[in-house]
Image: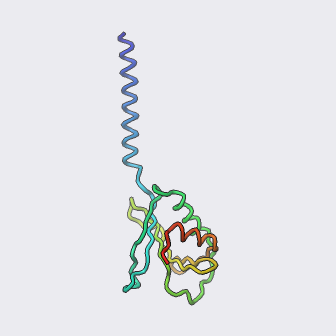
Amino acid sequence: MKRFYFVLSIVAAVGLVFTGGFAVAKTMYDKPVREVLVGYSHEERKDEMVIKHSFTDREDLNTVDNLQQIMMFSEVREAPSNLGERDVMITVRNPQHHVSLTTTSVWFEGDGAWLGFDDKYRWISQEDAAWLKKAILFEE
């Protein structure tokens, strides 16, 4: 009978250690790593952005991953000189470290969209632009 209680106490202790480790890991590491902020130009002050929508990789990992894939694998092109005012600005940031990973201005056109990264411009297809509009809940 002593052996039974000894084995039972060992099993309970191991279970308690694993449960405690799981709880600690869940609270420490279950935070979003990437957050996407969708901003529009302020009506009066065009150089300021108003954040209308945001989502994280914990809420929708596929959307954040697809968005970054579209940005990374878009075609580098010489931008036309008449782009005008951007339609939307997208910022991907790390909320844990308060660091912006990338910020891009987006100009939607009928056959695709331009992505502006600092002084470089990239082009995405009409299919990718339609997906992007849906993903960021674009307001025209």
Please say if 119 is above or below 55.
below
Foreground pick, 20 / 97:
20
Please say if 110 is above or below 4.
below
Foreground pick, 30 / 41:
41
Tell which residue pokes out farthest to the front in this image: 140
Please say if 59 is above or below 117.
above
Number of numbered callouts drawn? 0
Residue at screen point 62% across, 74% down: 124
Residue at screen point 40% across, 78% down: 49
Foreground pick, 39 / 10:
39
Q: Position of residue 93 (x, y in %)?
A: 44, 65
Tell which residue pokes out farthest to the top in this image: 1
* Colour scheme of the picture: rainbow
Please say if 96 is above or below 130.
above
Position of 135 with respect to 98 (left or right) is right
Quadrant holding the N terminus: top left
Position of 80 with respect to 29 (left or right) is right
Q: Position of residue 65 (x, y in %)?
A: 54, 60
Q: Position of residue 105 (x, y in %)?
A: 50, 77
Q: Which image quadrant for residue 44?
A: bottom left
Residue at screen point 37% across, 41% down: 23
Q: Position of residue 99 (x, y in %)?
A: 41, 65
